[in-house]
Image (cartoon, rainbow, N blue to C red):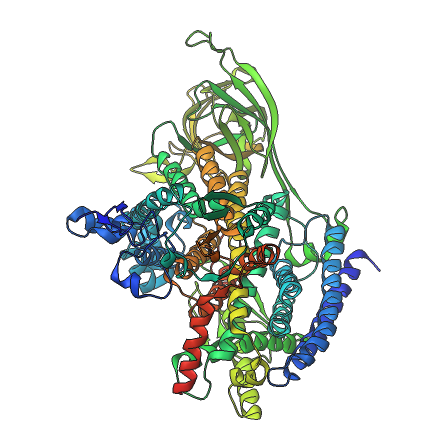
Amino acid sequence: MEKMQCKCGHVNPPGTVLCESCGRSLTEKEQNSKLVDMRYEGTARRSQTYNKTIVDKIWNFFSSVKVGVSLIVVILVAAAIGTILPQQQYVDVPVRNAETIQAYYADVYGSVGRVYHFLGFHDLYNSFWFIILVGMLAISLIVASLDRFVPLYRSLKNQRVLRHASFMNKQRIYAEGNGTEDTLDKAEAKLKELKYNVSRDKNGLLAEKGRFSRWGPYVNHIGLIIFLVGVMLRMMPGFYVDETLWIREGETRAIPEAPGYTLESKNFEMETYNTEEDEVFEEAIERVGTVAKNYQTDVVLYKKPDDSLPGANDLEKIEESAIRVNQPLKFDGYAIYQMDFKLNELKAMTFALTNKETEENLGELTIDLINPKNDYELENGSTVKLLGYYPDFSGFENGEPQTATPLPNNPGFLVEMTTPETPGGETSFITIQNTVEPLGENQYKLAFQSADTRDVSGLTIRKDRTLPILGLGGLIFMIGVAQGMYFNHRRFWIQQQADGGILLAGHTNKNWFGLKKDLDQVTEYASLPAYRDQQEEIEKQKKEEGEALS
Amino acid sequence: MSLADMSSNLLYAAFIAYLIASFVFGGAVKGNKERSFDSENRWGKVAFAITILGFLANLGYFFTRWGATGHPPLSNMFEFTTAFGMTLVGGFIVIYALYKTPIIGMIVLPVALLIIAFASMFPSEVSPLIPALQTNWLAIHVSTVVIAEGVLAISAAAGLVYLLKVVDMKKNSKQRFFLEAIMYSLVIVLGFVISSTYFTLTDYQADFTYIDEKDAETKITYNMPPVFGMNEYVQLTEGTMTPWVETPAVVNASKLTTVFWSFVFGTILYWVIRLVARKRIAAIFKPFVKNVNLQLMDEIGYRAVIIGFPLFSLGALIFAMIWAQIAWSRFWGWDPKEVWALVTWLFYAAYLHLRLGKGWHGEKSAWLGVVGFAIIMFNLVAVNLIIAGLHSYA
C-alpha cells in the first residue's frame, strides 16, 4: 500500500484516516460523514490497513474487539459449566486414581456424572482447551492493545496546534463567530487556570488536559498480562512448592521441599465454642451442635547450620510458633498452614503378660506403634518377642497378615511369649478385637491394659515465588482501570482567522458534560462564540425524522 | 434490651421505612403530569428523607450487631444478604443525591425489601466465627464485595427502568417476554418469602431419616409439606404428607421442596396480580415511567458499572486472592464461589468492551445491566445453596 499524501503536503502512513498534521479527512467515507471518528485519532491501525498475508489475518483476528469479547464470553460460560458438578480435586474418594474418580462421578451423579466426566469437565480448568482459550485471550489482549496503542501514542505525541477547518467543524463540540484581539490571550489565561496545558502556534491555540487517561486501557491490559505470566511461571522448577506434611504430637520431621529445615510438633489443639463462655452465641451453638473455634499446632522450627557436617544431627532452633488457620508460619519464602488434623491416633499400647488360668500377671510391656522394639524383657526372665507388626491390619492373605497403610489405625501384633513355665515359647496374633493362637492353645496371653493416643496435624508447606509478580500485575491493573475510568482527556482547538473570526472545537474521550462545563467558563471569560453539540443535533434530527415517519 | 435485640429492632425499623419510602416514591413518580416534574420534586424529597432514616436504622443494625458479636456481620447467608440490601439502598442514595431520580428509588427500594426479606428466611441468630473467618480480611474482603455488588445492582435498576419505558408491552416480542420474565422472577422471590413465612407461622414440621451420599443414615426436618422425599427416606412424623417423589442421594429434596413451594406461591401470586390488573406486570409500570429521561438512565447504568467494576475487581478478586492465600494456602482454587466471582467479573469486562468498543448503548446496555444482576443473584443464592463449596456457610 502507498503512503497517503494530504493536501497540506504531509505524508501519512498507509491507512491513515485523518491527516496527522492538519486533520483533514483522507478517506471518502470520512469526508462524507458529519462528524469525524476520534476514537484513535484517525490514525493508521495495522489491523485496518493490511489483510493480505497469513500474519495480517492472524493479527486482525486477535485485534478485533468482537473476537476479544467472544473469547471472554466463551471462557465465562466454560468456567460456569465447571461448577455444575464438583471438580475432581474436591471429590472425596478413599483411594485417589483415575478409575476411582471416574467411578465416583458415575456412582454419585449417574448418567449426568458419566457424561460430565466423559467430556473432561471434571478437570475443566486444567484441560488443554480451557488453557488454550485463556492463552488466546492473552494474545488478544496483547495484539489488540498494540494495534491501538502504538499509532495512538505517535499521534498524540506529535499533535499540531493548527488544524484544518474541516477537522474543526467535524468535531462534536464546535463554534464559530466573532472575536476580539485579545480573545486567544484571555482563553489561554482561563484554560491555564482550569489546569489545561496550552500551546500556541501563530493564530492557533491547543489546550489539553488528562492525556494520560488515554493510556488507562493499555496499562490495565499490561497488568493482566503480567498476572498471566506470573501464573505461567509457576510451572518453572523452584518457583512453586505445594506439599502436605502429617506430623504427630512429639514428632520431629524434615520439611518436604525445604532442604535443611525440620519441624517439631509439640501439641495440636482443637477448641470449640461453648455456651458458657460464648453466651451471646448460645442459640446458634444449640442449633448447630458444635462450632469450631480454633485449630492450632504448636511447633518448633529448626534449621541445620550451613557449616554442618553431612550426617551430623545438630539442629539450630529458629523459632517457636503456633500455626493457626489464617496464621501460617512463614520462613525463608515458605509458609506452613494448618489445613487438617486427626484426633487421637494410637501412639502406644500397653499389655500385661498374663497366665490365662490363674490370671497371674508376669509384668507389663508397652509397644510403641510407630517404632516398635523387637524384644521386651520382663521381670523374672519372661520375654516377649515381636515377630511381626501390622499397623493397619486388613486381614489375611495366603495365611499372612496384611496391612492396608503404615498408619496405626488397627494395629496387629504377631508375638512370641516366653516364660519360665513355657521356655519353648508360645505364638499369638493380637488385634484390638481378638486374639488368634495359630500354633495351638497357649497358656499365656497378652492382656490389653491401656492405649496412649495423640493428635496428628495436617500441614501444608507452600512456597510461591510468583506472588510478587501476581501482586504487581493486580496493582498495575487497578491503576490502569482507575486511570482510564476516572480521568478523561479533554482538548480544545481555537483559531483566530485573518478577519478576526474565531473557530473553536472541543473533544473528550468521555464525560462530555464535564467538558461543556469547562468550556462554559472559558466562553464567558473570553467572550467566545456560543458552541453547539453536533452529536445531540444529529440525534435530535434523527428522532424527529423517526417520529415524522411513524 | 441487649445489643443483639436492639440490632434486630433497628433492622425492622429500616424495613418499614423502606416499605413506606417505596410507596411514596411510586406515588411521587405516578403523580407527575405529562412532561412535568412537580409531583416528583415535591414527594421525591419526602421519600428520600424517609429512605435516609431507614438507611440510618439499617447502619444502626449493622454496627450494633457488630458490637454484639465482636465481628462484622458479614459471615453467613442472613448477614451477607442483609448487607447486600443495605448497600443497594446506599448506592441508590448516592445516585439520588447526584441525579435526583425518584424512579430509581421506586425500583431499588422494593428490590432491597425483597432481598432483606429473603435474607431473614435464613437463621438470623448471632453466630460465632469458624477459624477460617477469624481475620480482618472478613471485613475487608466481604464489605468491598457487598458494596461493589450494591453499586452494580444500581446499574440493573437503571436498566430495568430503561426497559420498562422502551419495551412495547402491547406487541408480542422477545423483549416483552424477557422483561416480563424478570418481573415474574421477582414475584417468585416474594413467593419464597410468603411460603416460608406461612409454613413457619403454622409450625409445619415433618421429620425423616434418609441415606445420604456417603451411605450414612441422617435425620432431616422439613418445614414445608414434603413434595420431594430424600433418598430412601423413612417418615418419622405422623399425619404429615407422604412425598410424591423420592430423589437420589445427590439431590437435596428438602431444598427442592422449598423451591417447589416458592414457585407455587409465586406463580399463584403472579397470576392474581395479572388477572386483577388485567395486564402484564411490566405494563403496570408504564404510567410510572412516562417521564423517564432515557439518556439519564443509560448514564446512571454506565456510571454504576464504572464505579462498581473496579470495586468488584478489588474486593471479589484481589482481596479474595490475598485472603485465600492466607487462609487456604492458595490464592485460587476454582472453588465454585471463586469461579462465579470470575464469571461476574468477565461479564462486566465484556459489558465495558461492548459499550466502549462496539457502541452498545441504550437498550442493549440496559439488558446487559439486568443480566449482570442476575449473575450476582445466582452467585449469592444458587452457589451458596445448591452448589456445595468452601463458601457454603449458610
Q: Picture coordinates of residue A136 (x, y %)?
A: 29, 48
Q: Quadrant of the C terminus of chain B?
A: bottom right
User: Residue at left 25%, top 62%?
Assistant: A28
- Mark count: 0
User: Residue at left 33%, top 53%?
Assistant: A42
Q: Picture coordinates of residue B299 (x, y %)?
A: 52, 65
Depicted A516 relative to depicted A490: above or below: below
Q: Nearer the viewer, residue A122 or A527?
A: A527
Depicted B138 relative to depicted A171: above or below: above
The part of the image, by quadrant, that contains residue B353 is bottom left
Q: Picture coordinates of residue B338 (x, y %)?
A: 47, 51
Residue that extends furthest to the front in the rendered view of this protein: A499
Residue that extends furthest to the left in the rendered view of this protein: A53
Q: Picture coordinates of residue B202 (x, y %)?
A: 67, 79
The part of the image, by quadrant, that contains residue B89 is bottom right
Q: Nearer the viewer, residue A238 or B309?
A: B309
Residue that extends furthest to the right in the rendered view of this protein: B1
The part of the image, by quadrant, that contains residue A546 is bottom left
Q: Does residue B120 appear in the picture of this structure?
A: yes
Q: Does residue B394 appear in the picture of this structure?
A: no
> Relative to A1, is A90 on the left or the right?
right
Depicted A339 relative to depicted A311: above or below: below
